[in-house]
Image: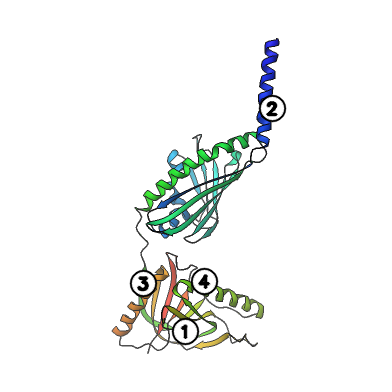
Amino acid sequence: MKTILSIAKILFGVVLLILVITFFLPSKVHVERTALIKSSPETAYQLINNLEEWNQWSPWHRLDPNMKITYSPSKEGKGSFYEWTSEHDQVGNGKMTIAETKPVEYIKTEMNFMENGVATGEFFLRPVEGGTEVKWTMDSDMGMNPIGKLMGLFMEKWVGGDYERGLHYLDSVSQLQKPAATKMELEMGRVESLKLMLVKGTATEAEVGKTLEGIFGRLGELAVKEGIAITGVPVAIYEDPSNGTYAFEAGFPISSKPSKALPADVIYMETPASEAAICHFKGNPKSTPEAYQKMIGLIKEKGKTMAASPMEKYLSDGDENSADMEIDIIWPVQ
């Protein structure tokens, strides 16, 4: 009996000691791994941002090829998600949602492991010599649960190993991907007259996207404040670049001439209806100079001359790093 009591006291003491130790253990866990992905940021981003692509490189998908997956209607971008069930003890059940994105640079995921808690995952992409540096992180709060805090001590090894394998698979798969093809569909057509609210701007090639974004944001707020009806997508009318600097007038088509005086730097302009060379562009905006050269060729082929500066209509969001931005380039001719 004394022996049993002695063992019980020892066990109680060990449990008590563990509880005391876990009280001082951190509740928050952070894991990160970084690797060079030998492909473009656009390719790496697409493989992460499209949840169906995770079948190719996710370390957990490879652990259990038989796991059952249900996707949201949209399978890529913010708000898309998938739910999985697995009998594999290292995979389990859960749901992952893309919570935030910045094209070609950043993706944030929220992972719900059901009874095993929740975690936040983040991908940071940076172009470097030889490809793309991808940093993959995980953050989780284990709370005050002693068992959870003890498990947190092993997350660096467990999850870190999975991340290393996942980034290795991502690198391998990315090198097999074909780069997104730039599409340029040219035609001759007619454009309607437009009433435009514009602001003049200048920027280097690297700063054009940020400058346009600032102008569009400001004019959008002005339209709301003054009750001006915007009737279409944002546009920019470009002058020829000089020494790497672009001069342009950017803004929105509106329903009618504003009844109130506009700020001094805001221009109201009406463009006439006319015949035009039109290019339906989809790809990286850095490839638009090629589109302009093709348009010049089409204009000459048709025996026409340029009648005004070209206009770009931005049909989708994006910046200079976007792989599939949609732009209509319109060049009035006579």
User: In which quadrant of the rendered image does the N terminus lie?
Assistant: top right
> Closer to the camera: disc 4 or disc 2?
2
Name the residue that disc number 4 marks: 210
Could you tell me the amino acid type at mark 4?
Lys
- Contact flag, marks 4 and 2 (Cβ < 8 Å): no
**133 and 228: which is toward the camera:** 133
Of helix, strand and loop, which one carries label 4? helix
Left or right: 157, with 229 as reference point: left
Mark 4 and mark 3: span between their CA atoms? 24 Å
Q: Please provide percent x and percent y for residue 250.
A: 51, 80
Within-10-Å neighbours for mark 3: few <14, some 14–19, many 20+:
many
Mark 4 and mark 2: span between their CA atoms? 58 Å
> Closer to the camera: disc 1 or disc 3?
3
Could you tell me the amino acid type at mark 1?
Glu
Name the residue that disc number 3 marks: 184
Q: Which is more N-terminal, label 3 or label 1? A: 3
Q: Which is more N-terminal, label 2 or label 3? A: 2
Quarter of the image for residue 189 reads bottom left
Of helix, strand and loop, which one carries label 3? strand
Q: Which is more N-terminal, label 1 or label 4? A: 1
Within-10-Å neighbours for mark 2: few <14, some 14–19, many 20+:
few
Q: Residue at x 39, y 58 (%)?
A: 129
Could you tell me the amino acid type at mark 2?
Leu
Q: Residue at x 35, y 88 (%)?
A: 305
Mark 3 and mark 2: span between their CA atoms? 71 Å
Mark 1 and mark 2: span between their CA atoms? 80 Å
Q: Please provide percent x and percent y for residue 159.
A: 51, 41
